[in-house]
Image (tube, helix red, strand yellow):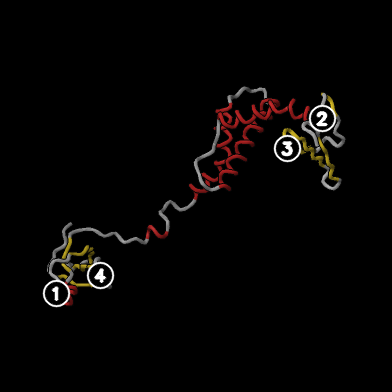
């Protein structure tokens, strides 16, 4: 096949036409069309498929510019998420074009995007407000540690280590007496909890 010549193949099942044009000795240009089933030469060696593409490719460039002007895409390495961002951008541009053709109320594209985002997230936001206003289960189970540090009596007896300090938690007993319970946690060895009763501490209001 010489440079500039084209070959077209029609698929009767999918009703599409594939045209291959030889641009150079090492380069082939392929066009797939669903509306041209009998390619004809219009300008010298150009077919009607090529002429139709050249006449409408300006709209493709304009469409890409609109998508880049107000894009919801974020930096990510996950290709499904990148594809999802592209679908959202395409939908926003197409819906804004339809809005301009049917609605008489003028609205800028930025305001239109903001309005659509609020409408799409409204039901989700309401469901979140109606749910429980508490932290997640895992966060609520974290025990609050704090207060002064004390040497672990059990570790001192077992290991004869007098310099190891561990976080402690002091709680009042349920019977509202002046008896307190100290709960010590061995941090360095991750040993089981050691419970020690401490008497003689008066309750301070």
Image location of residue 142, percent across then percent down: 34, 60
Mark 3 against mark 4, which lies toward the viewer?
3
Q: Which comes before the other along the chain, label 4 or label 1?
A: 1
**Marks 1 and 3: in contact by CB < 8 Å?**
no
Residue located at (58% from left, 24% from top): 108
Residue 141 shown left or right of residue 17 in the figure: left
Please, what secondary structure does the residue beneath circle 2 have?
strand
Can you say which quadrant of the picture contains the N terminus?
A: top right
Whether residue 53 is situated above or below residue 176 in the rendered picture: above
Please, what secondary structure does the residue beneath circle 4 have?
loop
- Measure how far apart labels 3 and 4 are at the Cα level: 70 Å
Q: Which mark is residue 47?
A: 2
Q: Which comes before the other along the chain, label 2 or label 1?
A: 2
- Measure how far apart labels 3 and 1 are at the Cα level: 83 Å
Identify residue for label 3: 28
Residue located at (18% from left, 56% from top): 205
Nearer to us in this view, 89 or 79: 79
Mark 2 against mark 3, which lies toward the viewer?
3
Whether residue 170 is situated above or below residue 196 in the rendered picture: above
Residue located at (49% from left, 41% from top): 75
Q: Which comes before the other along the chain, label 3 or label 4?
A: 3
Nearer to us in this view, 32 or 68: 32
**Marks 1 and 4: in contact by CB < 8 Å?**
no
- Measure how far apart labels 4 and 1 are at the Cα level: 14 Å
Local packing at callout 4 (Cα closer than 10 Å; few below 14, some 14-19, many 20+) is few
Q: Which comes before the other along the chain, label 4 or label 2?
A: 2
Identify residue for label 4: 189
Q: Which mark is residue 160?
A: 1
């Amino acid at each position: 096949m010489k440079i500039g010549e084209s070959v077209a193949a029609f698929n009767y099942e999918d009703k599409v036409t594939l045209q291959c044009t030889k641009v150079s000795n090492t380069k082939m240009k392929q066009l797939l069309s669903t509306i041209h089933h009998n390619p004809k030469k219009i300008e010298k060696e150009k077919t009607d498929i090529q002429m139709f593409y050249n006449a409408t490719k300006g709209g493709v460039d304009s469409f890409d510019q609109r998508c880049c002007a107000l894009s919801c895409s974020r930096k990510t390495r996950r290709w499904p998420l990148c594809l999802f961002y592209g679908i959202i951008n395409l939908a926003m541009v197409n819906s804004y074009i339809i809005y301009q053709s049917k609605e008489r109320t003028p609205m800028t594209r930025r305001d239109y995007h903001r309005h659509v985002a609020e409408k799409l997230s409204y039901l989700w936001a309401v469901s979140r407000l109606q749910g429980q206003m508490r932290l997640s289960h895992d966060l609520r189970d974290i025990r609050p540690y704090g207060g002064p540090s004390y040497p672990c009596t059990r570790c001192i007896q077992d290991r004869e280590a007098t310099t190891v300090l561990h976080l402690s938690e002091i709680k009042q007993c349920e019977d509202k007496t002046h008896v307190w319970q100290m709960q010590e946690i061995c941090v360095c060895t991750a040993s089981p909890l050691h419970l020690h009763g401490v008497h003689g501490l008066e309750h301070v209001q």
